[in-house]
Amino acid sequence: MYSFYQKICIFLLFTLPLGIYSNEIIFLHAALEGEIKIRNSSISQKDLKYEFSKLASDIINQELLVSANALENTSENQKEICVTRRVHYVSKDYFYFPQNQMPSVTTSVYNCSSGNEIKKESLLKGYIYQSLNEHYKKVFHFIPSRSSINKNNFKAKESNVLFFIDASASLSNEKDELNQFISNEIQTKNLDLYSNLVSAGNYYTFTNSDISTVPFSKINSPEDLYIGYRKHLQSVKKFKELNIQFLFISPLQYTKKKEWITLINEARSKGILTYILIPYSSDHTYYQTIDTIAKATNSKTLPITVWKKVGYIQGEEKYLVLHKGYLYTTSENPAKFESFNEMDKKRIQIDEKINPYNLNQLVEKYTNQKIIQESKYQSNMTLLLKNTMSVLNFPETVNSKRVLVRSNGQAIYIQVKPNTNLVKGETYILESNFILDSSNSWNIRNNVVRTKIHPISYRYPKLLEFNPSEIADYLKKYNLTELKAYLVITVEEVL
């Protein structure tokens, strides 16, 4: 049981203002020892101490509910800074970079109110931004995290997810995996999920429930799908901040390009971002048509890949991979590939249409190798859907503006909010978080919500200044889900 005074303290903690004022924490120039190798060659060793303090203040401002600034070099002591700057804490980092050993940081925090000083040390493992982020959370544990207040589950309150499915026999192979994914999303995430299916001309609508009861049987007519798609859009009770839809339709239906461009753009006008799932049994000739539709509607394509392991009579084992209508063979497990477009693979030249049912026969015919053993098919469909669902935490809104910019000679498309004013030919500082996205230039995409455009005079931590070509490498090297970065950009075109 809490005592009376404890209850009073808890009441005050949750009812009184947090007292977050400008410049509550001042970071002094960092102390550096050892050999320091930095990526940004434009930073001089003279400026490095300030840049580390600027990096600290940048992390604090983004992660904790407090305002922090990096102080220019000063001869004032901690007490004098407390009085003249009217701050709550004065902090200083001491970095140690030993040769061939893991670097460390010790942070000293002086409390202007009590006159007490604390010190805490951490090893810097992996990417320095993430390491320092965890370190400062430990040092400033008494300051609330922004994530506890501002980063509530975006999926739960601010998004709709829609599936429109052509429940025809040609897609029946994928039904169980698709249903399992939909069911798992319902069970594990509190989101509004609408599943709409057309089966033999009949229409089925589900809200937050699985699709197992719907038969995947006869081929649907184009007209049935058009009508079903409009009912699909009408099924959404309320459009939210983020609305995404997955289209799972027989590629044969997309040959009527104009009709589907019109229908998908109708969804786009409602603020829905479209992902086109392409079945693994698709003939490679359909991909060009679907890419045309995707470009005309600002949609994304998700080609499903399947593979299985086979053993030849000679004793050799290989993986057969069916990707975008072509057949490849590889000795590596495709489940470990980050991108099927970039994997080390060997294509088998086959002049016939390939599907999972005739794959063995075609391999034997064109390679003169007898298959005597095979495993079950595996698919990357669930992984594709899971990775795509991650945009719910990293939204790419259809209401954003696409801008072509150049940074250090490298051209890249970025997305900005519609009310962002950018002038062609002008130079700015871009602040954003990036994720891997193989469909965009340099294999990266910026987060619209967390993108800010600053004037060229803006002071930012140059330790976080990147070239576009470096970002994807850092994401992969340190296995990051996202990367905070600053780019010096010149606007080429506002689309």
Image (cartoon, rainbow, N blue to C red):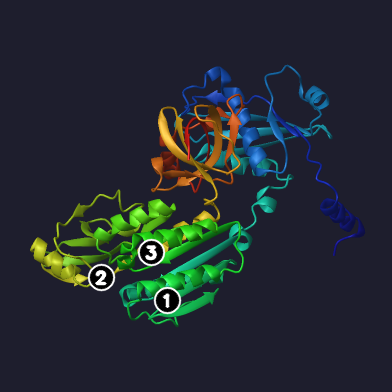
The residue wearing badge 2 is 375
**Vertical order, 131 against 300 (above or below):** above
Circle 1: element type? strand
How dense is the environment of label 2, judged by Cα within 10 Å: few (below 14), some, or many (20 and up)? few
Looking at numbered disc 2 in the image, what kind of residue is underneath it? Ser
The CA span between labels 1 and 3 is 21 Å
Q: Residue at x 24, y 70 (%)?
A: 356
**Image quadrant of residue 226?**
bottom left
**Vertical order, 316 against 476 (above or below):** below
Q: Which x, y percent locates residue 204? A: 48, 79
Q: Residue at x 47, y 68 (%)?
A: 163
Q: Are marks 1 and 2 in contact (CB under 8 Å)?
A: no
**Vertical order, 129 against 276 (above or below):** above
Circle 3: element type? helix
How dense is the environment of label 3, judged by Cα within 10 Å: few (below 14), some, or many (20 and up)? many
The residue wearing badge 1 is 198
Q: Earlier in the sequence, mark 1 or mark 3?
A: 1
Foreground mark, 1 or 3, reads 1
**Which corner quadrant holds the N terminus?**
bottom right
Q: Earlier in the sequence, mark 1 or mark 2?
A: 1
Q: Which x, y percent locates residue 373? A: 18, 71
Q: Which x, y percent locates residue 319? A: 23, 61
The CA span between labels 1 and 2 is 32 Å
Foreground mark, 2 or 3, reads 3
The residue wearing badge 3 is 381
Looking at this rendering, what residue extends furthest in the right direction? 4
